[in-house]
Amino acid sequence: MFILAENISKIYTMGKCKIHALRDVSFSVENGEYVAVTGHSGSGKSTLLHILGCFDIPTDGTYKFQGENIFDINDEELSRIRLREIGFVFQFFNLLPRINVVHNVELPLIYAGISKKERRERALSAIERVGLISRSAHNPQELSGGERQRVAVARAIVTEPELILADEPTGNLDSKTGEEIIALFGDLHKEGKTVIIVTHESSIAEKAERVIRLKDGRIE
C-alpha cells in the first residue's frame, strides 16, 4: 500500500479551546492513483494534506507512507522523505520574489546537495515540462498567477517525487488558467505519479479518479 491512513485524528489547542480538525479518518491510496480531497472550508482538507506530506503529525491514529509508519521515522529520514519523495504545491505559490524562476525551481535540489551543473539541468527540464522555459530568467513578480503556479509545479516535480500533493492549486487563478494547471496534474498522473489534490471546486474534483469528501473533519 502506497499510503495508508488509519483512524487519523488531529486536535489543535488554542488557549483553553481544543479544535478537532480531523476525526477518525481512514483511507488508502494505491501507487499511481489520482485522488481529490474536497469539502467546505474548515472541513479538515488542508490539515489532512499536511499530514500526508509529513509536514504535520496526527494527534492519534497511524499514517504509513510506502509501508513506513511516520511515527517510527527519525527527523532526518522524515526530512529526506519530504525533500525527495513528496512534491508539494501550495495555494499561494511560496516562491522567493528576488530570485528568478530557475533558482526557485532549483531550491529543493540545493537542499538535497545536488551539484550546480546537475541541478541547473534538472531545473530547466522541469521548467520545460510545465511549458515555461521562455520565462525561466524572470522573477516571480514578472509572471502572471498561472505562470507562478507553473513554477510551483516545476519546483514540486524537480526531485522526481513519487507523490505530488497540491493544496487548492487553482484557488487564486481564473477558471481558464485553473483548467490549464489541472491539466498539468493530469499529465503527471499519466506519467505514473500519485497525485492528491485538495479542492473545494467540484469541477476540479471530478477530474480525479476518486474523490474523498470531508465534512467537519470526517469522511462523508
Image (cartoon, rainbow, N blue to C red):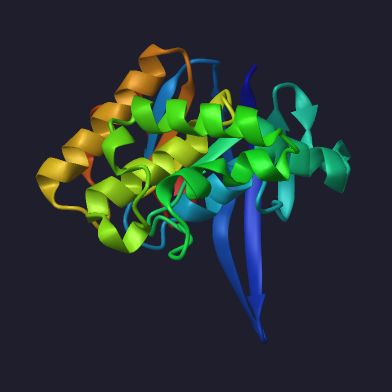
Q: Residue at horizontal 83%, vertical 42%?
A: 71
Q: Residue at horizontal 41%, vertical 28%?
A: 35
Pick out the residue farthest to the bottom: 15
Q: In this rendering, does residue 199 appear at all?
A: no
Residue 47 quadrant? bottom right
Where is residue 141? Give x, y as percent: 31, 63
Q: Is residue 114 left or right of residue 34?
A: right
Where is residue 37? Give x, y as percent: 40, 40
Where is residue 66? Give x, y as percent: 70, 22
Q: Where is the C terminus found, in terms of image quarters? A: top left
Q: Name above or below for residue 204 compared with residue 34.
A: below
Q: Name above or below for residue 25 compared with residue 120.
A: below
Most foreground residue, 125 or 7: 125
Q: How many marks?
A: 0
Q: Where is the N terminus found, in terms of image quarters? A: top right
Q: Residue at horizontal 67%, vertical 86%?
A: 16
Q: Is residue 163 left or right of residue 146?
A: right
Q: In this rendering, does residue 23 appear at all?
A: yes
Most foreground residue, 209 or 147: 147
Q: Residue at horizontal 29%, vertical 43%?
A: 135
Q: Name above or below for residue 194 compared with residue 84.
A: above
Most foreground residue, 36 or 152: 152
Where is residue 219? Give x, y as percent: 45, 42
